[in-house]
Structure formats: C-alpha cells, structure tokens
Amino acid sequence: MRRAFVFILLVLFCAASVILALLTGGTELPAGEIIRTLLHPSSEGVTHTLIWELRIPRIFTAGIVGAALASCGVVFQAILRNPLAEPYTLGVSGGGALGATIAILLGISGLPMAAICFAGCCLSIAIVLGAASLKRFTDSTLILSGVIMSFIFSSAVMFIFSVASSREVHASILWLMGSLSAPPQGSIPMLLATLPIMAVLLLSAKDLNLLSLGDESSYHLGLNAKKAKGLLLLTASLITGVCVAVSGIIAFIGLVIPHLARRLTGADHRYLLPSSMLAGAGFLILSDSISQVLIRPLELPVGVITGLVGGVFFVLYLLKARPAEVV
C-alpha cells in the first residue's frame, strides 16, 4: 500500500515538473497562450515553435536522461555494493566526456558519437574495477579510483581544449558542464533507442537483488554472478554513454535519486528501479526549468544545479555516516 502511494506521488511529481517546464523556460510566455498552443498543435507562430519544437523535445530529453542516469546509479550501487557508486563518482561519465569531446572536435555526431562515448565509458569502468580489484574492492578504493579517473579524463579534455580553436572550446565547455539547451543532431532517436535498453534493467531487478547480497550468496541462489555483472555493467555503461553524448556530464543524479528512492520504497529493486526512474525524470526536468529562469535571460547549465544538490547531499552523508563508512 505504501509503495503504491509512493508511485502515485512520483507520477504527480513528474507531471508537476512537466507542467512547470511548459509554463516557464528561457522565454517568458503568457500561460493562456501556452495552453492554446498545446490544444491546437497545428497552429503556427512563435509560440508554436517555442512549445512544440523547443520546450517539449527538451522536456522529453530531460525526462529520459534523468531516468536513465538514476537507473544506472541503482545498478552500479547494487553490483558494487557501494552507496556512493554512480556514473559520475566512478569516472564513467568522465570517460564518456572524453570520447564526446574527441567526437565534437572531429565533427562527429549522432550514433557514431554515442559509440565513442560508450567506448570511453567502458574504458573508464574497466580501469576503475581493475584498480579496485588490487585492493579487494574496498569502498574507498572504488570511489578514489573513480575520482582519479575523472581527474585524468578531465586533464585529457583540457589538453584537447588547449590545442583546439576558441570557438570549438567555448561550445564544448558549455556542453560538458551538462546542458540540454542544444542537444546534438539525432538525440531524440538515440534516447528512444535507450528505452528498450532501460527495460533490460527493469527485467533484471531480481538479479540485482541477488547481486546486492554478494557474489557467494548469489551463486548459491543459482545466479551466475560474473555473467550477470558483466551484462549489467555493459548495459549501464551504454546508457551512460548515450546520456553523455546527448547532454554532457550531469552529475550526482545517479547518486542522490537512488538514495532518496530507497528510503521511500525499500531496497527491493523491483520497486526501487521504477521509482528511481520516475524520481530522476522529474528531478532533471525540474532542475532544467530552474536553470532557465534563475538568471534569465541567461541560462545556467543544468549540471550546475544538479552539482549543487549533489554537493549538499555529500556533506549530509559525510555528517551522518559512521567513520568506517567514509574511509
């Protein structure tokens, strides 16, 4: 009963975020004119262009990216049994960003760009897991390895910027800060393609429940832990690569949202995954709306908003965690 109530609240939260995003935006429009345009999609004019060609695709993009990053955070936390694991803290987003930067400077977009981002994500997670395996996968080693990889990839990106033209650098920096204002060509088809991939994560909820118990326990319960981990890590890395290709680095959604959803629905991934997807979608749509109106007519990268929320969350986690959990 409680879980059903939570799902209803999350659906209402997403709906409210969508309505707010439609009514706000970088350009202020009368609410009545927005409603008329929504009711008459075949009409023409500036308002029609802003709503149907800019705001609605942007809301869709924010919703899918938010849901995808939140679900990837759930997967990484379950597989690695680490409450601080997510695409950003593990350096996965950094690897994808390096791939995306190379693709941007080479003039590559669409699916080839997503493939390069995916390769960067896989490279990063492989290095992080390899380094952590030398120290028996301790929590601190995993997170420190991810942070180190993020710094290394960031340094590589800065080096590329130092030898690129100023025009390319300016556009790339704004994008890498996490932005939904100018998604690359082919973003909508790429995001639509991630929906069946995200369905794979939902169908793997029972496996995630077993993996969160540990490799030995999951083996005795009939699960091939190594095969399941490999499939889920590749799936999550692919989703992260697409998200980075579309929106740049949007940090901490995969960290904050799963923790909040776990408090609401419990640790059962059959309920945790869908609730995290709903919460992640609503949160990123809301954050994007705030980024557009906070210093209007200028626009903040949405990664600034999510980064501030994630920073506050890290401080609260540090204050509440026991000493053994943060070393």
Image (cartoon, rainbow, N blue to C red):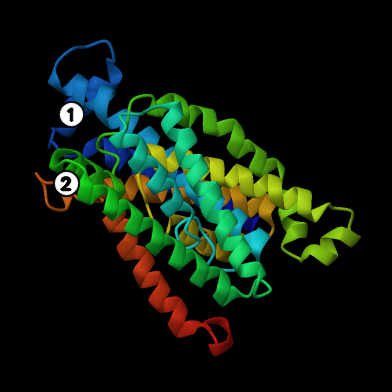
The crowd level at tag 1 (other Cα within 10 Å; few <14, some 14-19, many 20+) is few
**Front one among 247 and 117:** 117
Q: Position of residue 215 (x, y in %)?
A: 79, 63
- Identify which amino acid the numbered label 1 is placed on: Gly
Q: Secondary structure at mark 2?
A: loop
- In the image: residue 218, left or right of residue 137: right
Which quadrant, please, contains the N terminus? bottom right
Residue placed under numbered mark 2 in the picture: 299
In which quarter of the view is residue 281 placed? top left
The crowd level at tag 2 (other Cα within 10 Å; few <14, some 14-19, many 20+) is some
Q: Is residue 199 above or below residue 52?
A: below
In which quarter of the view is residue 30 placed? top left
Q: Position of residue 226 (x, y in %)?
A: 77, 54
Q: Secondary structure at mark 1?
A: helix
- In the image: residue 262, left or right of residue 231: left
- Identify which amino acid the numbered label 2 is placed on: Glu
Residue at image location 27% in from the left, 10% down from the top: 42
Residue at image location 24% in from the left, 51% down from the top: 290
Going from the N terminus, do you reach mark 2 or mark 1 first? 1
**Front one among 225 and 204:** 225
Residue at image location 64% in from the left, 43% down from the top: 201
